[in-house]
Image (cartoon, coloured by chain):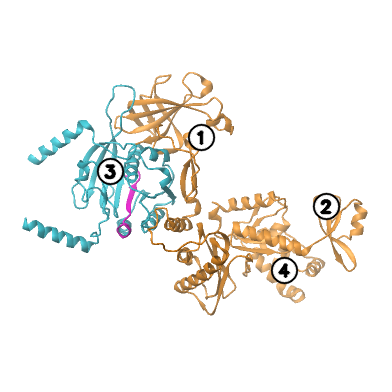
Chain colours: A orange, B cyan
């Protein structure tokens, strides 16, 4: 299958799928020639506007999910500035993996590259056929693009041909060559692109925003640069945005504030809320808490506040006469403030799950999420402090089912005076993950023991004490009781 | 008689100047022996309290449940700021603090834990704030104490794996040390109710004291062991005679 575009009365192949490529059809051939190669080739008219719209939609999706800085890099890519956004996913590579997985799952063939500069990322993504995300370490752009063809520099096709004629095939040749003669022939564009890719001059990315969501913008006659001024403008912008949100009956879940610097840099702060909100004081406070991350440089000449994520929120009476309940909107404000400061993941509530193994019986849930409906057990003794993973200990114990008399943990000797148990837990064989706790026959016999100083510990033995198939009979410590 | 009214008046005026004049009430233990020793008759709300176990995990676990027992008897959400997650929620439930009420903040470092605590303490809708740190400075304790006074929220700094000599120079109103104590031998291969040694190492407007108590029940209440109630009273008498 191939798409075609009209060109001077002929039809030229614009893009091909994998099957057509395998058969030798390449973009740039005339349709007639392509048909002669592959008679059963299906040709459809290409739809450049539709492609651009699709690209824009994809970029906006990535903008909602990963970073406020997103811009389409027509015709076939988009840029995502992930500076400072990695913490939402843990690490940069986790973010990249997530992006790759999701785009690939949607059926697109995707090439990802992470680099210091947009130019370098553009070149590597398109000219390194790695088949997986490529990360260029900071400061290594020069090494990364040196062996790539000059076409990777985003130059007009005419210039690329010209360079080839002069014998310039790879970028490293350009880096080493004298600049003046080349500039005379190809203009300043050539070296501008080269410097952009190498990170010697800055290339601003003009982010795009969804059309239908509230947006507020202020331009300034005189650039501003102080935190107080930013706070004032933010509160104005938030008020305007809240007004727009009221009109469409929605509340903000996420706000991006862009600071346009005089020299063309755009910086952004992004805040999220745990529940849709139209409380302008609360939203302004969240944004103001992040002002310190902005480098004003010579001054900010415009600020834009965008709401990339909004959810329906019914109209509500503001300050009612009744006192707010304990779980009132107040708590959401605190949760947001903490989540924006320490990361969404660091804030959670714990919910019980249906699992026998103690280490799996609790899962983290978002702080204000509804309860999952499982109940907590009331009768089984459970330790207050549990070790991340059980640690092996040496014990003196009588088989098959007496509590240990003595155990050695972290090179310290504990003499046991009293004990209770066993509480027998069977492995969750239906999980089949291959982990020890999930083997079909595995048994853990848990004992509560009290040492001579009164400390109470939770020990277990793998295996039932008589049958080797149920475990190795080794002892572990798993936690401490009150 | 006359002198004591003058003294009371002076105390009230000093309290007003110190800013501790605003009383936010207190959370009693429901055990007279303890409550009598604490100004206000319990753990003061709107104040910072410090507690520690020891480097032994079982002592830290005891301190955790002691703390849980106090929080179980107040209404509303509790924020628990930790450096890492080794707290096991079902145990909180067993001591009467429903896990739905607890929101955990995994802040990652001591500094962040203290920052998170301060943020939480500025909210009056919170029932209690706990912060687990390994070390904290006098300045930090003053900040937390001021924040707690302002909102009336009770705050606890839990020093994890604390060594006995640590913990001087803090603005906290009380300082507790909780260590496990041997429980009663039931004579059968089973365990009785756990016991703790409770050291009130410092209390503003009171004197240090130690108790042996029985651990929290399902509603978070501690109790004095039946056999020990009389003995400690007798010891007190002897001390006051001498």
Q: Is residue A139 left or right of residue B180?
A: right
Q: Select label 1 or label 2 by which is in front.
A: 1
Q: Earlier in the sequence, mark 2 or mark 4?
A: 2
Marks 3 and 4 on same chain: no
Q: Which residue is mark 4?
A: A177
Q: Earlier in the sequence, mark 1 or mark 4?
A: 4
Q: Which residues are magenta?
A: B148-164
Marks 3 and 2 on same chain: no
> Is B152 a magenta residue?
yes
Indicate the position of residue A184 as horizontal and vertical percent values.
75, 76
Q: Which residue is mark 2?
A: A21
Q: Earlier in the sequence, mark 1 or mark 2?
A: 2
Marks 1 and 3 on same chain: no
Secondary structure category for the residue under label 1: loop
User: Marks 1 and 4, how far apart in space?
Assistant: 67 Å
Q: Chain of mark 2?
A: A
């Amino acid at each position: 299958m191939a798409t075609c575009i009209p060109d001077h009365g002929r039809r030229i192949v614009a893009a091909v799928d994998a099957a057509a490529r395998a058969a030798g059809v390449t973009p740039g051939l005339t349709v007639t020639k392509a048909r002669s190669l592959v008679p059963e080739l299906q040709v459809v008219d290409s739809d450049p506007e539709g492609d651009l719209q699709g690209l824009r939609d994809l970029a906006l999706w990535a903008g909602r999910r990963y970073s406020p800085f997103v811009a389409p890099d027509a015709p076939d890519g988009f840029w995502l500035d992930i500076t400072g956004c990695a913490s939402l996913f843990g690490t940069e590579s986790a973010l990249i993996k997530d992006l790759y997985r999701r785009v690939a799952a949607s059926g697109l063939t995707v090439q990802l590259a992470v680099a210091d500069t947009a130019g370098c990322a553009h070149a590597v993504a398109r000219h390194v056929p790695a088949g997986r995300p490529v990360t260029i370490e900071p400061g290594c752009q020069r090494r990364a693009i040196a062996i790539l063809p000059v076409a990777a520099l985003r130059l007009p096709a005419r210039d690329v041909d010209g360079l080839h004629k002069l014998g310039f095939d790879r970028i490293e040749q350009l880096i080493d060559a004298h600049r003046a003669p080349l500039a005379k022939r190809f203009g300043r564009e050539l070296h501008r692109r080269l410097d952009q890719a190498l990170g010697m001059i800055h290339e601003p990315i003009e982010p795009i925003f969804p059309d239908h969501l509230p947006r507020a913008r202020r331009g300034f006659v005189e650039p501003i640069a102080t935190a107080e001024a930013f706070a004032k403008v933010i509160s104005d912008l938030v008020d305007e945005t809240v007004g727009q949100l009221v009109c469409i009956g929605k509340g903000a879940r996420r706000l991006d504030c862009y600071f346009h610097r005089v020299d063309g840099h755009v910086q952004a702060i992004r805040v999220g809320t745990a529940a849709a909100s139209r409380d302008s004081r609360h939203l302004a406070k969240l944004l103001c808490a992040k002002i310190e991350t902005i480098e004003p440089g010579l001054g900010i000449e415009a600020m834009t506040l965008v709401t990339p994520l909004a959810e329906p929120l019914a109209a509500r009476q503001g300050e009612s006469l009744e006192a707010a309940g304990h779980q009132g909107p107040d708590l959401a404000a605190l949760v947001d403030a903490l989540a924006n400061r320490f990361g969404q993941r660091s804030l959670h509530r714990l919910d019980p799950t249906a699992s026998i193994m103690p280490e799996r019986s609790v899962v983290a849930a978002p702080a204000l999420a509804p309860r999952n409906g499982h109940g907590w057990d009331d009768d089984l003794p459970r330790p207050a402090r549990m070790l991340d993973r059980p640690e092996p200990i040496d014990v003196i114990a009588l088989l098959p089912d007496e509590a240990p008399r003595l155990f050695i943990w972290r090179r310290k000797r504990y003499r046991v005076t009293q004990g209770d148990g066993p509480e027998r837990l069977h492995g969750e064989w239906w999980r089949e993950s291959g982990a020890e706790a999930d083997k079909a026959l595995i048994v853990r016999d848990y004992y509560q023991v009290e040492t001579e100083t009164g400390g109470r510990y939770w020990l277990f033995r793998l295996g039932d004490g008589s049958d080797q198939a149920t475990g190795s009979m080794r002892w572990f410590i798993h936690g401490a009781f009150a | 008689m006359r002198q004591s009214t003058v003294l009371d008046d002076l105390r009230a005026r000093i309290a007003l100047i110190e800013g501790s004049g605003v009383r936010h009430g207190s959370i009693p233990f429901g055990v007279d022996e303890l409550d009598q020793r604490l100004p206000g008759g319990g753990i003061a709300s709107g104040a910072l309290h410090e507690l520690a176990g020891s480097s032994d995990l079982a002592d830290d676990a005891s301190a955790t449940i002691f703390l849980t027992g106090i929080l179980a008897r107040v209404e509303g959400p509790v924020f628990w700021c930790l450096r890492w997650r080794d707290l096991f929620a079902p145990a909180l439930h067993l001591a009467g603090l429903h896990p739905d009420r607890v929101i955990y903040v995994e802040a990652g470092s001591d500094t962040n834990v203290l920052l998170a605590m301060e943020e939480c303490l500025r909210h009056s809708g919170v029932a209690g704030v706990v912060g687990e740190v390994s070390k904290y400075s006098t300045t930090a304790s003053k900040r937390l104490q001021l924040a707690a006074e302002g909102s009336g929220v009770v705050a606890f700094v839990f020093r994890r794996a604390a060594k006995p000599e640590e913990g001087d120079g803090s603005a906290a109103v009380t300082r507790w040390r909780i260590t496990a104590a041997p429980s009663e031998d039931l004579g059968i291969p089973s365990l009785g109710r756990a016991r703790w040694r409770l050291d009130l190492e410092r209390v503003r407007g009171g004197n240090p004291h130690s108790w042996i108590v029985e651990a929290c029940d399902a509603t978070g209440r501690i109790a004095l062991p039946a056999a020990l109630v009389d003995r400690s009273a007798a010891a007190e008498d002897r001390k006051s005679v001498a």
